[in-house]
Image (spheres, rainbow, N blue to C red):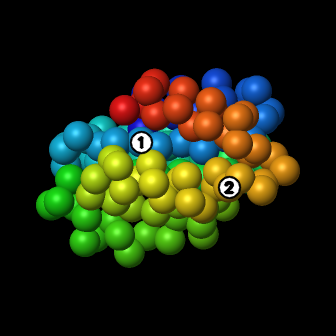
Amino acid sequence: MRRFGGALTIWLERAAPFAAPRVFADAEALRHTENGAFPANQWMENNAGRMCHSLMGLASVVPPSAHEKMARMNVEKAVGAKGGIFLDRHDALASLAEQVFTLGDPVFGPVFGEALFCDLAVRIL
C-alpha cells in the first residue's frame, strides 16, 4: 500500500480525473506490515475528499488464493470510485475502459482518456 499510496498521492495532487489499475503479485503483497494498517487507514481518511474528486476508477488484480475473499469488497463503497477485484490484469483494464473511459464522456474523451489510461497501465503494470 505504501508504494501504491505514494503513486496515488502524486496523481491526486494533479487534481485531474484519473483511473488506477493496481496488481498484487502474490498474497503477501496484500498483507499489511506490522502496524501498517493504521498508516494506510490514516492515508485513506486524509485523502478521501481528493479521491472523491479525482479518482474515477480503481481495478485491483489479486492472486487466485485471495480472490474469493477480496471479490466481496465493494470498491465503489470503499473508495468512492467505479472498479472491481480481478484475477487477470487484462480483465481489470477492460473493466476500467468500460466503466470509466467511454467515448461520449465529457471528461474522458477518446484521445485524452486513451492516453491517460495507457500511461497508467504502463506505469503500474
The three-letter amino acid code for the residue at tag 2 is Thr
Q: Residue at x 74, y 27 (%)?
A: 13
Vertical relation: 47 (above or below) 3: below
- What quarter of the picture does the N terminus occupy? top left
Residue at the farthest right position: 106
Q: Is residue 33 visible?
A: yes
Label 1 residue SS: strand
Vertical relation: 115 (above or below) 93: above
Q: Is residue 45 visible?
A: no
Residue closest to the eye, 116 or 6:
116
Residue 14 as seen in the image, left or right of residue 70? right
* x, y percent for residue 91: 37, 56
Residue 106 as seen in the image, left or right of residue 103? right
Marks 2 and 1, the one that precedes in the sequence: 1
* x, y percent for residue 68: 25, 71
- What quarter of the picture does the C terminus occupy? top left
Where does label 1 land, which residue? 22
Where does label 2 land, which residue? 102
Residue 26 as seen in the image, left or right of residue 30? left
Residue closest to the eye, 76 or 121:
121
Q: Nearer the viewer, mark 2 or mark 1?
A: 2
Quadrant of residue 22 within the rendered picture: top left
* x, y percent for residue 78: 57, 63
Q: Residue at x 48, y 59 (%)?
A: 95
